[in-house]
Image (cartoon, helix red, strand yellow):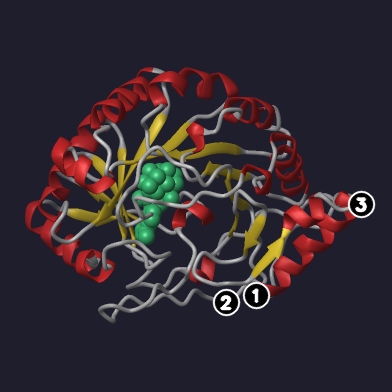
Amino acid sequence: MNQPAPLPAGLPAPLVDQFQRRITYLRLSVTDRCDLRCAYCMPERMTFLPRKDVLSLEELHDLALGFIDRGITKLRLTGGEPLVRRDMMELVHALGRKLGDGLEELTLTTNGTRLAEFAEGLVAAGVRRINVSLDTLDRETFARLSRRDSLPQVLEGLAAAKAAGLKVKLNTVALKGMNEREIPEIVAWAHGQGFDATLIEVMPLGEVEEDRFDHYLPLVAVREQLEQLWTLTPSDHRTGGPARYFDVAQTGGRLGLITPLTNNFCEGCNRIRVTATGQLYACLGGNEQVDLRAALRSADPQAALTEALDTAMRIKPARHNFAIEQRGAVPALARHMSMTGG
Ligand code: SAM
Ligand code: SF4
């Protein structure tokens, strides 16, 4: 595991968990709301949180600065859909000022529907790379999958991101019987656009209407399918995330595979997640949590936050514990990905 250099003396203690993993990467959800309803992510009639429960702009800002003080160098804003939050760009601009001053990278994960409007603003704030989720290039499949007819906006958003100079990584959830056959086309299209492509296995998070087992597609099978078409060479490329990368000789692009269910990548974990209500989840696949909102709303927020983050380091588990084997099984975790942030 690559350990970053120790912080100079006199600064607040870096975040190191009980297994000596240095935590440098925070995924911060800024909203649980979304303009799409991807079937594997949330039900059509999703109940969103009351606004008073969601962290305010100031709270999100203070929280992020608190984390940067403790050695977080990479910050990913996510959701729900981060670009539907009204004051999102204000937050991005404020956090962008920390780039080069503790923060090395500010980025976001978005469904792309509003990128046409915001791509240039993101670049102006210092964002250089973004992840865009896109599970299909077929308009009808998109509408079925996300329950909204928004593919044209997403494609427009991607074009705007490219034109603004953002590096784009396309994230695609591999879904049996949905986009299974289309995966080579999506990867080839992404590479043709100059985007990286990453495939993700569906994870058992939160109740949705359909049984995810029906759509669970192990990436080992996808990899075999792709290897019939292309030469995949394992690459040393790392982004501080759990993806393992391959160079695709025929497309000249890079392909990432994230396999939380078939492979364990926990050993080198450097990340934590915070929900839009300020709940820190020490692991995407576990229930270990610390209430940072209570800390932020306490009489001495700074001291309370320090203590809460120390607690998080003590409870972060060694590894996650997902299982999707049984048909009809209850979700491994009751919370939706839109809550924890992807
Ligand atoms: N709305 C933004 C988007 O879609 O990119 C950001 C939040 S979304 C929850 C982040 C990522 O989580 C997306 O790439 C989405 O496909 C993925 N995701 C959501 N639910 C998932 C699940 N149950 N299993 C695997 N990935 C999931
Ligand atoms: Fe919204 Fe992203 Fe979940 Fe789709 S995956 S419903 S875009 S939060």
Per the model, the C-alpha gap separating discs 2 and 1 is: 7 Å
Say which residue label 2 marks: 318
Say which residue label 1 marks: 19
Q: Residues within 10 Å of mark 2 (few under 14, many from 20)?
A: some
Side of 268 where 244 appears, left or right: left
Q: Amino acid at mark 3?
A: Asp
Provide the secondary structure element on which disc 3 rests. Answer: loop
Nearest the viewer among 16 and 85 is 85
As drawn, which residue projects farthest toward the bottom?
326
Q: Residues within 10 Å of mark 1 (few under 14, many from 20)?
A: few
Q: Amino acid at mark 1?
A: Phe
Whether tag 2 and tag 1 are in contact, CB under 8 A, the answer is yes
Provide the secondary structure element on which disc 2 rests. Answer: loop
Query: Relative to 240, is 62 above or below?
Result: above
Say which residue label 3 marks: 300
Mark 3 vs mark 2: in front: 3
Side of 188 where 36 appears, left or right: right
Q: Position of residue 168 (x, y in %)?
A: 37, 34
Residue at 17% over, 61% down: 176
Residue at 24% over, 32% down: 151
Mark 2 vs mark 1: in front: 2
Residue at 21% over, 41% down: 142
Nearest the viewer among 182 and 72 is 182
Q: Amino acid at mark 2?
A: Ala
Instruction: Report if the beta carbon of the residue with label 1 is closer than 8 angstroms to ligand 1.
Output: no
Provide the secondary structure element on which disc 1 rests. Answer: loop
Work out whether mark 2 precedes mark 1 in sequence or the reverse, and give the earlier one.
1
Nearest the viewer among 252 and 127 is 127
